[in-house]
Image: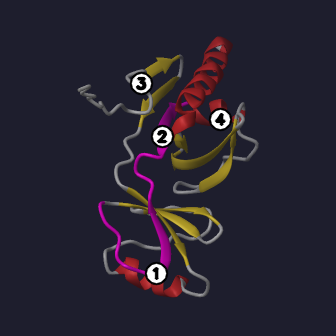
Amino acid sequence: MCVVKLTSKLPFDGALPCDIGPVSLVEVGIGPMWSVAPFAGRQADCVTALSKIGVIWPDVGRCTLLSTWFGLDQIMVFGSTVPDMPAAVTDQSDAWACIAIKGAAIDVLARLAPVDLRATDDTVWRTQVGHMPAHITRVSADVYEVMVMRSMAQTLLHDLTRAATGIAARG
């Protein structure tokens, strides 16, 4: 009989944190995360259900403490449980990887993302980073979080490292 022992790994497998010139890359632990996509005409019911557990439905392009806009009629909710509601709800906890870029974050992302990232805190974008679909959140003026599908974690790390190295080379 063959016994297999499975070991969980973080998406970036110990490669983070790292500092490159004026930039720090840090892995962000996402924890429990749920996709919520209300059934047609039922968003108000979902807003009500989520408010009972302290989750605010975010506006388009925005995030709140426990939720983030993720596209047309879809949000992600962070936390261990979600209530029953008229929506397609799926556990996304292990499906995504996230890196916080600290320091010259906007300079790094300007090399990789085709959007204007000058905005207020708690603004989010669904866009491309390099060749990957990504979700970017402005946490503060010099901190942005980039989330990609877990299968693309190493590619994200490579692209961010390369862009940060270019920024560092400018001096």
Check the image and report above or below for 71 versus 15.
below
How far apart, in angstroms, are the residues tagged by discs 1 and 2? 26 Å
Q: Which residue is mark 1?
A: 47
Q: Which residue is mark 2?
A: 97
Please state which amino acid type lies under the numbered disc 4.
Leu
Residue 80: numbered disc: none
Earlier sequence position, callout 1 versus callout 2: 1
Residue 58 seen in the figure: yes
Q: Position of residue 99 (x, y in %)?
A: 48, 36
- Of 72 and 117, nearer the camera is 72
- Local packing at callout 4 (Cα closer than 10 Å; few below 14, some 14-19, many 20+) is many
Residue 105 image-quadrant placement = top right
Q: Residue at x 74, y 46 (%)?
A: 115
Which numbered mark, 3 or 4, is in the foreground of this view? 3
Q: Secondary structure at mark 4?
A: helix
Please state which amino acid type lies under the numbered disc 3.
Leu
- Local packing at callout 2 (Cα closer than 10 Å; few below 14, some 14-19, many 20+) is many
Which numbered mark, 4 or 1, is in the foreground of this view? 1
Q: Secondary structure at mark 2?
A: strand
Which numbered mark, 1 or 2, is in the foreground of this view? 2
- Tag 1–tag 2 contact (CB < 8 Å): no
Check the image and report above or below for 112 versus 45.
above
Q: Which residue is mark 4?
A: 109
Earlier sequence position, callout 3 versus callout 2: 3
Q: Which residue is mark 3?
A: 16
Query: Which residues fall within the magenta stretch?
Result: 80-104
Residue 143 seen in the figure: no
